[in-house]
Amino acid sequence: MQRGCRDRSLAARIAASAILRYAARSDGKAGLGMLELCSFFDRKIFYLEGGSETPAVFYIADRDAGGVLINAPRHDPNLLARLEQLAPLKVLFLPSRFGAQDVDAWRAAGARLVAQPVEARSLGIELDVPLDSKLRLTRTIDFLPMAGRTAGSCALRLRNKPGVVFFGPILENDEPDAWPTLVPHDDDQSWENRLFGSLGLQDIAFEYAFTDRFQPHRSPFGPGADRAIGARLAQLLED
């Protein structure tokens, strides 16, 4: 454990306190399981669902920004009530079109939809906050466009230390226990853009990183994410 964030590389990640916070979904409904991953002085980060066949969904309970969904979970009134207890739901951020489900229901619940315009066009939906000229949500939350996996793939960054980046589909774990890297897909919008965009990560410091591929208690996320991911990307480029 470091800087208030639970590090999955420690034995404590499977301690009873964590297990009690995570209840397995036995009836298929959204929101019956929720795992607190990180706790900082001004925000907490929770895992909600997905991560294998569907993109992982995370919730940031932020003191200034309110509640921020990373990808859309299945809509469920019980889940909404639990999220509102953590922080009033304010934003639904889609790192790519892959994370869109029940979008209208979440907007009706009060979430402003934030994404790159090209992703919204591919979904046939309107955005409340298009990420064209605006790339900052608050003083400490901004966005990092990294096209290539899709035409409008974009990461969300928590700037203040220790630093957290939600990469969506831009990076992923090629093995459940491995740090994220670039993984090619047949439907990549541009593999070359993905390689080029990854070079920009050399100048960004962050201790924790989350992607659309996430397995609770297995996937590494920090601390030391920037160094670990940098090493994996360097190895990829050398090969």
Image (spheres, rainbow, N blue to C red):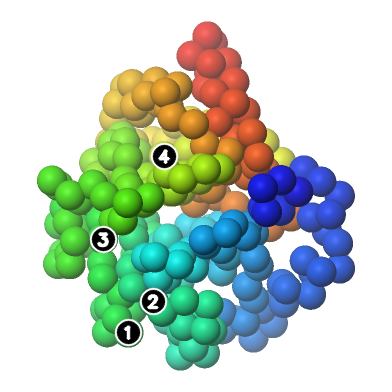
- Please name the residue shown 62% across and 60% down the image: 39
Q: Which residue is rendered at x = 37% and y = 65% of the image?
A: 65
Say whether residue 132 is left or right of residue 63. left
Of the two numbered discs 1 and 2 on the same chain, state the one appearing first in sequence.
Answer: 2
Alpha carbon distance from label 3 to label 1 = 15 Å
Three-letter amino acid code at the position of disc 3: Val
Residue marked by disc 2: 89
Q: Classify 89 as above or below 72.
A: below
Q: Which residue is tagged 1?
A: 109
**Is 90 on the left or on the right of 175, as rendered?**
left
Q: Residues within 10 Å of mark 3 (few under 14, many from 20)?
A: many
SS state under label 1: loop
In which quadrant of the rendered view does residue 146 lie? top left
Identify residue type, mark 4. Answer: Ile
Name which of mark 3 and mark 1 comes first in the sequence: 1
Q: Position of residue 157 (x, y in %)?
A: 41, 46
Question: Residue at point 52% right, 62% down?
Answer: 43
Q: Earlier in the sequence, mark 2 or mark 3?
A: 2
The disc label shown at residue 170, or none = 4
Task: Calculate the distance from the C-alpha at mark 4 to the C-alpha at mark 1.
Answer: 28 Å
- Circle 1/circle 2 CB separation < 8 Å: yes
List x then y, in percent, for residue 28.
59, 81
